[in-house]
Amino acid sequence: MQDSSTHPKSLLQWLLLIAPFFLWGTAMVAMKGVMDRSSPLFVGTLRLVPAGLLVILAAALLGKAQPRGWKAWLWIVLFALVDATLFQGFLVTGLSKTGAGLGSVMIDSQPLAVALLAWLLYGEQVRFWGWLGLSIGIAGISCIGLPDEWLLDWFGGHFAWPTLDLSPWDSVQAFLSRGESWMLLAALSMAVGTVMIQRVSKYVDPVMATGWHMAIGGIPLLIGSLLWENDPWQALTLQSWLAMGYSTVFGSAIAYGLFFWFASKGNLTSLSALTFLTPVFALIFGNLFLAEVLSPIQFLGVCLTLVSIYLVNQRDRLPKLWERLPAIDEAEPLPPSTSIAIPVSEQDMSASASLGSDRQR
């Protein structure tokens, strides 16, 4: 018997399955709209702390156990520093310098880094489809993150490195002056946090850990905002507060709740296949509400990156689909109403299980 949670049958089930990715993508657009009236660290604090407290409350109402013991709290704090403080700090800084759509694409490239880290640290197989996806992903991120004039020079056969005459410090400053660079750092932070969740889950419930790490991880951002940002709330309008409320409640707490609910129902393979929808929604609504427009090279980079994310997320399932093609060709024609069910194995579930901790967009 097929699990109805893994194969949604009704329109409502499909909408709920897609909802977390829609909420994460549109939350990026809402946050971008607030940036002109506020400052990055304050926006990051508003995004993390209230949402974390809501997740903790919801987890407690669901009967999830609170963290116990110094090891549990130590891993939560480490997880908070990497996957909340650094990730959200890099994200909001990058979002203040680039568009919500491109930023979301860069953030969602983190499965590429997760695959590499899992290969290096745990010996997880990347296989042909994974390496192909990583290669395409590097090309896509390069098209997004590097200046168009550099790429056009290289395509034209001029391979001189543009920053060769700069000092190392000037090169670093040039790198950090681009919002895409900060988004890449955010993606790397998220990838490390995704790998860490395996250790965190040994000592505390993952949903409870998610709430606590968001609440704790927002504290350094709050301190930084109080020290370095001058009254970032004064220029906020009612519309700005509503946008931040949407990002916090819907883009964090509710999106997390739906994501973990589907994950608990054994729907990780379906979720991993839908990861690419987050930047798609961010690109669409960024264009509609913020008039964000991509250059042709950036559009090419977005397409390549989305293809690479799909290949890496589905690297364990694609060989099975590929092996079935000759058998289908040689078999007798099937009636039009006949469908072929492709089972989801435990290996497929474990390969995509790393996505359970990587959503804070």
Image: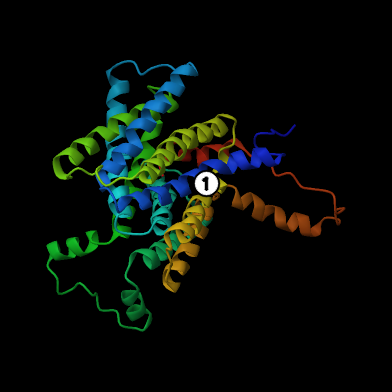
Total labels drawn: 1
| Residue 48, position as x, y percentages in the image | 34, 36
State the image quarter where residue 199 is shown.
top left
Question: Please, is residue 138 above or below residue 151 in the view?
Answer: above
> Between residues 29 and 338, which one lies in front from this camera angle?
29
| Residue 203, position as x, y percentages in the image | 37, 22
Question: Please, is residue 100 above or below residue 345 in the view?
Answer: below
What's the residue at 52%, 37% (across, down)? 350
> Between residues 351 and 218, which one lies in front from this camera angle?
218
- Mark 1: give few (<14), some (14-19) or many (20+) Cα within 10 Å: many
Could you tell me which quadrant the C terminus lies in? Answer: top left
| Residue 99, position as x, y percentages in the image | 37, 59
Could you tell me which quadrant the N terminus lies in? Answer: top right
Q: In the rendered image, is residue 7 in sight?
A: no
What's the residue at 59%, 40% (across, down)? 17
Q: In the rendered image, is residue 267 in sight?
A: yes
The residue at the far front in this view is 238
Dot 1 falls on a residue whose secondary structure is helix
State the image quarter where residue 212 is shown.
top left
175 lies left or right of 21: left
What's the residue at 35%, 39% (across, down)? 47
| Residue 256, position as x, y percentages in the image | 47, 35
Q: How is the image coloured?
A: rainbow
**Which residue is the site of mark 1?**
22
Amino acid at pointer 1: Phe
Question: Please, is residue 283 above or below residue 73 in the view?
Answer: below
